[in-house]
Amino acid sequence: MTAKTRITIEVTPEQADAISAALDLYSRLAIGQVREISHAFRFERVPTYRVENADRFCEIADRIESLTHEMSRALGFLPGASLGIHNTRVHLAGRRAYEVQKVLDKALADHRDPNPNSPGVTHYGLQLRCTHDPEPVATVIQCEKEDVL
C-alpha cells in the first residue's frame, strides 16, 4: 500500500467501543502494562471460563495477577512501572494502536455528548502524536436506516 492509501471501516457505536477496548489493551501491553491482563480477567472484560464460586474466582484472579507481576519483573519493570507511549522502545504497532484509539474515542465522545459541561479525557482526542503516520480519522455518521450496516 502507498502512503496515500486509506482504509474505511463502518461499524456500530457498540462495535467501535469493542475496537477501542482492544486498541487500549494492545497499546498498554506494548508499553509493558501486562498487569492489564489480570484486570481484564478480574473485571470480566475478556471471555473466561465462568466460575460460579466467588472464592474460586478470587483465587484464580489472584493467581493471574501474580503471574502478570512475574511477567513484569521478567520484562525488567518494577511493580506498577511501564514505559510511556512515546518511548522509542515501544513497538510502532503499539503506538499506532494508541493513536487510533484516541481518535476513535474522541469521535464517540463527541457523538454521545457534543457539548459536555465537563469534558472527559475521551473528548481530548489525540493531543500529542507518537508516530509519523498520517493522522487517523474517525467520523460518526447517522444512518437513515437501522439495517445499513
Image: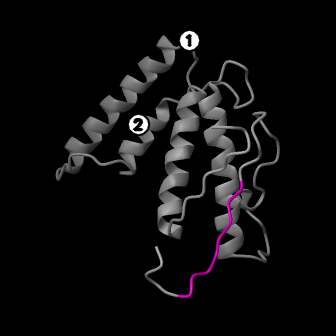
Density class for disc 1 (Cα within 10 Å; few <14, some 14-19, many ≥20) is few
**Residue 23: percent from the left, percent from the top?**
55, 45
Q: Quadrant of residue 118?
A: bottom right
Q: Main secondary structure of the magenta part?
A: loop
Residue 23 covered by magenta stretch: no
Q: Which residues are magenta?
A: 137-144
**Residue 33: percent from the left, percent from the top?**
55, 30
Residue on which the image places disc 2: 38
Residue shown at the point (56%, 88%) measured from the top left: 144
Q: Quadrant of residue 39?
A: top left
How many labels sit on residues?
A: 2
Relative side of 104 to 127, left or right = left
* Residue in front for this viewpoint, 10 or 68: 10
Residue shown at the point (65%, 28%) measured from the top left: 92
Q: Identify the secondary structure beneath mark 1.
A: loop
Q: Furthest residue to the bottom?
A: 144
Relative side of 42 to 7, left or right = left
Residue shown at the point (69%, 38%) measured from the top left: 2
- Position above or below: 69 against 111: above
Q: Amino acid at mark 1?
A: Gly
Residue 140 covered by magenta stretch: yes
Density class for disc 2 (Cα within 10 Å; few <14, some 14-19, many ≥20) is many
What distance separates the C-alpha of mark 2 from that of mark 1?
Answer: 18 Å
* Residue in front for this viewpoint, 108 or 84: 108
Residue on which the image places disc 1: 76
Q: Amino acid at mark 2?
A: Ser
Q: Identify the secondary structure beneath mark 2.
A: helix
